[in-house]
Amino acid sequence: MTQRLIAAIDTPDVARAAALVGAVAPHCGLVKLGLEFFLSQGAAGYKAAAQGNPVFLDLKLHDIPNTVAGAVRSLLPLGAQMLTIHAGGGAAMVAAAAKVAAEAAHPPKILAVTVLTSLDARALAEIGVAGGTTQQVLRLARLALENGADGLVCSAHEIAVLRDAFGAKPILVVPGIRPKGSAIGDQARVMTPEEAVHAGADYIVVGRPITGAENPAQVAAAIAASIL
């Protein structure tokens, strides 16, 4: 399949982002630009950083359906290959995002975020979610997929249960990936690239181990080679 690695370009600086994209894009299926970057630099910064490369635009939209529909419509001219929304926004919100995305000549894949990888069962309980992470992931995944989402953003530890529940069709994009020996950082639920792909991930997202490396291109190339 297409190169599975997505490099997370997590910086608000356009020049730094462009340099990182130029270095790692040959080894990645997509590059990820996130909320901090987009709020700092907007559409012009997006174009300058992306340099025409495929982009996973990770804004995790979450609002009332009409507002999210309008936000997706405003993003379509950028040509991102993937956009994220929060499944927790509800069925109508997911459906509104998917409907607008389908209007594009080259529709972006709408990916629903289920449970953030920084949240474990204790953190979910603190915000009133009972039943643990797996139950919540399945609940939100079903809602999202039944309302038009193309895939899911999930922890590597939920891949197997999602494949069992929904089969091979949904695109599974998995953050919280750390090559062996890397610091876990603020991710509560992590796996190595090889483990995640073996479990059934379509794409893995790797950020700081690549962007914080002395030679980001070399690290990206090594990760990409490890999951061929």
Image (tube, grey):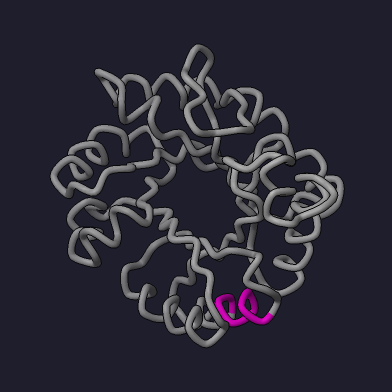
The residue nearer to you, when weighing 152 against 128, is 128
In the rendered image, which quarter contains the C terminus? top right
Q: Residue at x 19, y 44 (%)?
A: 18
Residue 126 magenta-highlighted: no
**Is 105 rendered above or below residue 179?**
below
Q: Residue at x 86, y 46 (%)?
A: 164
Most prominent secondary structure in the magenta stretch? Answer: helix
Residue 43: give x, y in percent of width and height. 24, 67
Residue 200: give x, y in percent of width and height. 71, 37
Q: Is residue 106 left or right of residue 48?
A: right
Q: Is residue 96 left or right of residue 15?
A: right
**Is 132 rendered above or below residue 104?**
above
View extreme (top): residue: 181
Residue 137: give x, y in percent of width and height. 75, 52
Q: Which residues are magenta?
A: 92-98
Q: Is residue 148 left or right of residue 71?
A: right
